[in-house]
Image (cartoon, rainbow, N blue to C red):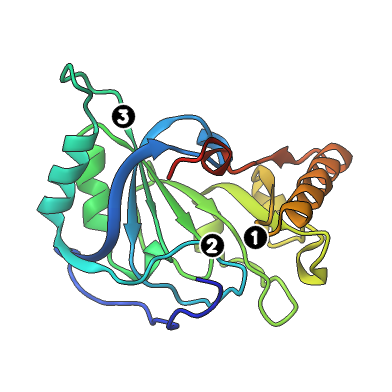
């Protein structure tokens, strides 16, 4: 999107109808569950306009929650009718713009592991079993401290790093130390082969210097969604 998306506000509602960009089976390419077979539910809209964003989350449709559950169930099985995907990743855009708690509850009841990926600017009450991967964004030159109610639920923090952008050169304290939250560093995709290689080496160096965990976008390396 490269920051050209509308900046959307959080929505109210009962979660029975949600705005969804797409649902698809793939491998989780980033963070703690990298390499896991997964089903992605990409929600529409975001409240930030990051100029390096590489994800299209607009042009969404309204889906009833039951239809989302049916689609997830369809993608969870292989050709032999065996369940091979138990991880559901709810991402965006920004999934916490929408009332996703009922969807998460229903997925958990059906035996799925649920992970959401958020930019850390919003929070809604979610079941404690939902794993929250937070990727803080640097806005106006600073990383804001994350709200306490969110920090209590974060499984891991994922910092996007770039050797070319001053605002994204370092991992900053956003509250992770008090909760002993694992930190991942991921090289920024700048749509430039040389810059991306430099960012990979830079992220690798940061990980080794500070004990962070390296996250690379496996799906892009493999050429899958």
Residue 112, position as x, y percentages in the image = 28, 34
Residue identifier under label 2: 54
Residue 160, position as x, y percentages in the image = 68, 57
Q: What separation in Å lies between label 2 and label 3 (alpha carbons)?
A: 25 Å
Q: What separation in Å lies between label 1 and label 3 (alpha carbons)?
A: 30 Å
Q: Residue furthest front?
A: 193
Q: Which type of secondary structure does the marked residue at label 3 adopt?
A: loop
Circle nearer the N terminus (2, 3): 2
Q: Label for residue 85?
A: 3
- Residue depth check, mark 2 versus mark 3: number of the one nearer the observer: 2
Q: Which type of secondary structure does the marked residue at label 1 adopt?
A: loop
Q: Which type of secondary structure does the marked residue at label 2 adopt?
A: loop
The residue that appears at 62% across and 63% down in the rendered structure is 136
Residue 78, position as x, y percentages in the image = 23, 23
- Mark 1 near mark 2, Cβ–Cβ under 8 Å? yes
Residue 207, position as x, y percentages in the image = 80, 41
Residue identifier under label 1: 191
For the question of whether residue 75 can be seen, the reply is yes
């Amino acid at each position: 999107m490269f920051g050209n998306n509308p900046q959307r506000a959080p929505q109210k509602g009962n979660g029975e109808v949600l705005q969804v960009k797409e649902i698809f089976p793939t491998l989780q390419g980033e963070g703690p569950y990298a390499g896991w077979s997964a089903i992605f539910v990409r929600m529409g809209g975001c409240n930030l306009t990051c100029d390096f964003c590489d994800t299209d989350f607009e042009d969404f449709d309204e889906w009833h929650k039951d239809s989302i559950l049916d689609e997830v169930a369809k993608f969870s099985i292989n050709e032999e009718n065996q369940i091979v995907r138990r991880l559901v990743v709810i991402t965006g855009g920004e999934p916490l713009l929408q009332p996703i708690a009922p969807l998460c509850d229903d997925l958990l009841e059906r035996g799925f592991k649920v992970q959401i990926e958020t930019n850390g600017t919003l929070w809604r009450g979610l079941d404690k079993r939902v794993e929250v991967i937070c990727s803080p964004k640097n806005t106006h030159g600073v990383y804001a401290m994350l709200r306490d109610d969110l920090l209590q639920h974060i499984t891991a923090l994922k910092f996007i790093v770039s050797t070319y952008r001053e605002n994204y050169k370092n991992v900053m304290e956003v509250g992770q130390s008090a909760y002993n939250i694992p930190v991942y560093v991921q090289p920024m995709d700048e749509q430039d082969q040389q810059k991306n290689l430099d960012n990979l080496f830079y992220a690798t160096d940061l990980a080794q210097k500070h004990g962070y965990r390296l996250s690379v976008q496996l799906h892009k390396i493999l050429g899958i969604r």
